[in-house]
Amino acid sequence: MDISNQAFGIHERALHLRAQRMETIAQNIANADTPNYKARDINFKAMLNNALGAPMRATQTQHYATAELPGAADGMRYRVPFNTPFDGNTVEMSVEQAAYGKAAMDYQTTLNFLENRIAGVRKALRGE
């Protein structure tokens, strides 16, 4: 394992996947008026497990279990609409905007974790 993996851990990969999820949601929003467009989303847990090569596990038996979402093995899945579309487009703007807001918050949180790790490495290198 190289030094960057030890220093940054899972956050480097998580940041990349969160950016990919925001891009997918942005594509959904951009295609809101495209007939027969199927809204997609990323199963973050499945993709992170795929990137790490091992499934994520709880550290305590008292932690809540998470439900596995159906979808492809690579983590991409189609979003199921709440209302039946007439033109075959499954993008619902309110759902996509809420998902994008949450994804942006998750991205910022992961970025903050990564910045804190970098600050810790800087302090260690300076001898503080």
Image: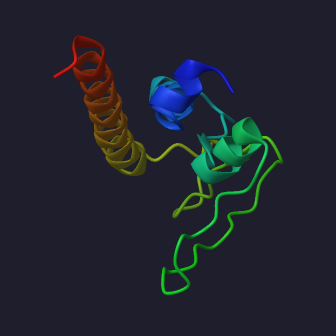
| Residue at x 68%, y 67% (from the top left corner) | 68
Q: Quadrant of the N terminus?
A: top right
| Residue at x 33%, y 48% (from the top left corner) | 98
Left/right of residue 118 with respect to residue 85 in the rendered view: left
Left/right of residue 85 with respect to residue 119 in the rendered view: right
Above or below: residue 115 compared with residue 113 = above
Task: Please state the horizontal and vertical placement of residue 113, each as a whole percent of the image.
Answer: 32, 36
Name of the residue lying farthest toward the front: 127
Above or below: residue 96 compared with residue 21 = below
| Residue at x 33%, y 46% (from the top left corner) | 102
Which one is nearer the viewer's eye here, 101 or 2? 2
Which one is nearer the viewer's eye here, 8 or 74? 8
Task: Please state the horizontal and vertical placement of residue 106, each as a whole percent of the image.
Answer: 35, 42
Left/right of residue 35 with respect to residue 95 in the rendered view: right
Task: Please state the horizontal and vertical placement of residue 58, each as a whole percent of the image.
Answer: 57, 70
Name of the residue lying farthest toward the bottom: 62
Left/right of residue 41 with respect to residue 75 in the rendered view: left
| Residue at x 27%, y 28% (from the top left corner) | 120
Q: In which quarter of the image is the C terminus?
A: top left
